[in-house]
Amino acid sequence: MQTFEYAGHTLTWEIHSPGEHTFVFLHGLYGARSMWSATIERLRDLGRCVTLDLPGHYPAQTPPDYTRLSQEFLIDIEVEAIKHICGDQPVTIIGHSTGGLVALGVAARLPQQVRRVISIDGVVWGPLIGIIGTCQWMLRRRLSPVCRLLWWVSQQSSWSMFQGARSYVYDFRRFARNPVALRINRDWYPDYRRQSPANWAILIRMLETCDMRPLLRGVATPVLAITGANDPVVPPEQAHWLDNHLPNATLRVFQHTGHAPQIEKPTEWETIVREWLARHPVQTAAPVAT
């Protein structure tokens, strides 16, 4: 694990495989780098796979006066972290949910360096729906103790965390028998139980008013916009907006799938990702040191 500091925040990142081209994986709200374990095992042959925190998500550390987060600062810190990790070398960013928002924002800021983006149920604008939308509603009405109680319950065991997936996936019975989901639950829980609900609340408030559309208009980077047709958190229309407004966007809709296609249907997801990457090759200038 390596660290990067910016404006009082410390982010952590880790290299999981060597290679000429760097793939940076960004998790979403409530997530951690460890939730990419099974996915990276499937893709590590593609190149240098790196996982990177979002601000305020353990093991990332925040400054003592951390009380708010803007869309602009979220993108700022991730831009600087990716420049630190990759230097001036090209990069492909794979982001889930809020990580998808960040991936798109970094591509808009670093159009010469970010060569490809894969946005998995990426947030484009707020507010959100489902459980996150409910939390946004409660926080707006000063009901944060209720949110914190729900989060506290979900952190008490790996079982209670896994049950929380009911609010995110399409078919929980199938999900509960999915070996990829079970593997991720095992690897992710030690970090999840140490997350700060106060930091989650800061990001949830930001997501309520975020709007990436003005920043993204005109972005020419190839984008693979993946969405679950039954996503209960980020409306699929947001991925359709990317497809309709970005000149090099490709849309893939997973039927009977919720907010985590890479976990709910990992084999189909991997096939689509590999085919799209092959259609959008990247020329690398030189190997990147590990």
Image (cartoon, rainbow, N blue to C red):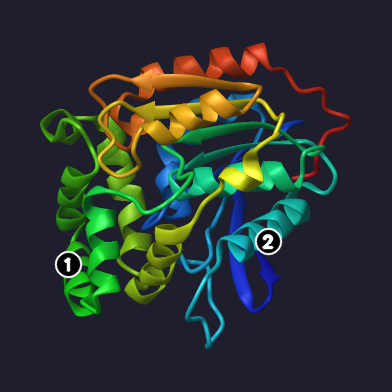
In the picture, the disc for residue 224 is none
Q: Is residue 92 above or below residue 152?
A: above
Quadrant occupied by the N terminus: bottom right
Q: Is residue 204 above or below residue 170?
A: below
Q: Position of residue 283 (x, y in %)?
A: 82, 22
Q: Is residue 138 left or right of residue 72?
A: left
In the picture, the disc for residue 150 is 1
Q: Is residue 154 above or below residue 91?
A: below
Q: Is residue 201 left or right of residue 216?
A: left
At mark 2, the secondary structure is helix
* Nearest-to-viewer mark from 2 and 1: 2
- For label 2, the crowd category at 10 Å Cα-Cα, with few meaning under 14, some 14 to 19 and many 20 or more, is some
At mark 1, the secondary structure is helix
Q: Residue at x 35, y 42 (%)?
A: 234
Q: Position of residue 66 (x, y in %)?
A: 51, 81
Q: Residue at x 66, y 63 (%)?
A: 77
Q: Nearer the viewer, residue 200 or 139?
A: 139
Q: Is residue 50 left or right of residue 157?
A: right
Q: Quadrant of residue 228?
A: top left
- Please say whether residue 10 is visible from this viewpoint: yes
For the residues labelled 2 and 1, the Cα–Cα distance comes to 31 Å
- For label 1, the crowd category at 10 Å Cα-Cα, with few meaning under 14, some 14 to 19 and many 20 or more, is some
Q: Residue at x 88, y 32 (%)?
A: 286
Q: Earlier in the sequence, mark 2 or mark 1?
A: 2
Q: Quadrant of residue 20?
A: top right
Q: Which residue is under mark 2?
A: 76
- Please say whether residue 41 is visible from this viewpoint: no
Q: Position of residue 198 (x, y in %)?
A: 36, 76
Tell me the kind of residue under disc 2: Asp
Q: Residue at x 16, y 30 (%)?
A: 171
Quadrant occupied by the C terminus: top right
